[in-house]
Image: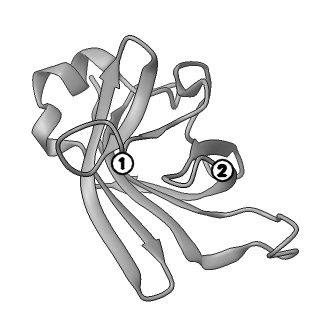
Amino acid sequence: MSGLKRIRLELARDPQYPEGSPAIGYDIVAPLADDGHLDQAAWAAAPAACTVRHFANAFQERGLLKHGPAGWFFDYKAGQSDDEPLFKLDSHVLTPGEYVSVTEHNGKLMTFKVVSVEAA
C-alpha cells in the first residue's frame, strides 16, 4: 500500500546557479509506491491531499499535484496558464539523489534534485 510522502526538490546546477540552490524548489505531498514512483491509483483516491508548495527565495505559491492526459503537473489556480508540467514523471522514481524537470510558468525547463522523501 502506498502512503503519502513529503518530497523536497531543490534547484540543481544550472548556468545561473552553478552549485544549485536550496532556496528554490518544491515541497510535494504525494503517494509513492514502494519502488519510488508516484502511485496514480492512490492519487486518484485522494487528489486534494496531493499538494505542492513552490518556493523561490521569498516567493511562495501553493497548489495541487494533478494528472491528466499529458502526464503529471502542478496546478496553482483555475485555468492552464499557470500549470507547470513535470517532464516524464510517470517514468521517474522520486528517491533522494534523483532528478526531476519542471517547465515553470515562464516556459523554461528547470532541473531539480530530490533531496528528501519522508512520511507526510
Instruction: Name which residue type carries label 2.
Output: Lys
For this view, does 101 lie left or right of residue 9?
A: right
For this view, does 43 lie left or right of residue 53?
A: left
Between 75 and 49, the one nearer to me in the picture: 75
Distance from Cα at disc 2 to Cα at disc 1: 13 Å
Name the spot of residue 60 as percent of width and height, x first: 35, 75
Dot 2 alpha-carbon crowd within 10 angstroms: few under 14, some 14 to 19, many 20 or more = few
Task: Please tell me whether mark 1 sits on a helix, a strand or a loop.
Answer: loop
Dot 1 alpha-carbon crowd within 10 angstroms: few under 14, some 14 to 19, many 20 or more = some
For this view, does 10 lie left or right of residue 81?
A: right
Quadrant location, the C terminus: bottom left
Q: Residue furthest top?
A: 69
Q: Which residue is mark 2?
A: 108
Name the spot of residue 79 as percent of width and height, x first: 23, 38
Q: Which image quadrant is residue 59 in?
A: bottom left
Quadrant location, the N terminus: top left
Task: Please tell me whether mark 2 sits on a helix, a strand or a loop.
Answer: loop
Instruction: Name which residue type carries label 1.
Output: Asp
The disc, 2 or 1, on the residue closer to the chain's N-terminal end is 1
Name the spot of residue 30 as percent of width and height, x first: 31, 41
Q: Are marks 2 and 1 in contact (CB under 8 Å)?
A: no
